[in-house]
Image (spheres, grey):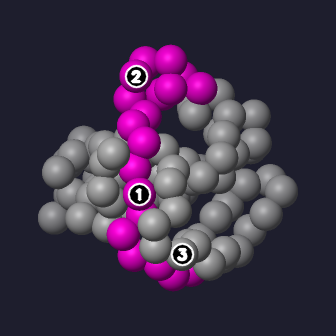
Amino acid sequence: MLSTSAGHQVMKYVRHHPTNEELSLAYYQAKNEGKLKPAKLLVGGDFYFRNSDFVGSKYLAPGITLEAEVYDNTIGHVWFSPIECEFVFIDELEFI
């Protein structure tokens, strides 16, 4: 179960349809604050993306390197580019 603050952050993000500019700002802010760490995706599959350029899923293979931010001990926010992100479970990531 998500902690209350992490669950609130996730639901706030999911309900809001961010623009590419908002996503880019959030990415660079997290990067500048040292919150993003390199990680490898441990599971492959279809990941859902939503931004102003693309709505839908993309297949990502296990082992792809990306940047991740930890919300709590359960959920991570992974970035595939400054405007493409998704929430995953922490146990689906290996921080490197």
On screen, residue 44 above or below 73: below
Residue 61: give its label.
3
Q: At numbered mark 3, what does the secondary structure look like: helix, strand or loop?
A: loop
Whether residue 44 appears in magenta in the rendering, the answer is yes
Q: Which mark sits nearer the N-terminus, 3 or 1? A: 1
| Secondary element type, mark 1 | strand
Label 3 to label 1, Cα distance in Å? 10 Å
Task: Tell me the distance, in whole angstroms, between the alpha carbons under discs 1 and 2.
Answer: 18 Å
Residue 56 x, y percent position in the rendering: 70, 74
x and y, in percent, of residue 60 in the image? 58, 73
How many C-alpha atoms fall within 10 Å of the one at disc 3: few (<14), some, or many (≥20)? few
Q: Amino acid at mark 1?
A: Lys
Q: Are marks 1 and 2 in contact (CB under 8 Å)?
A: no
Q: Secondary structure at mark 2?
A: loop
Q: Which mark is residue 40?
A: 1
Where's the N terminus, which quadrant? bottom left
Extreme residue in the top direction:
32
Number of other residues with Cα within 10 Å of mark 1, as a class: few under 14, some 14 to 19, many 20 or more: some
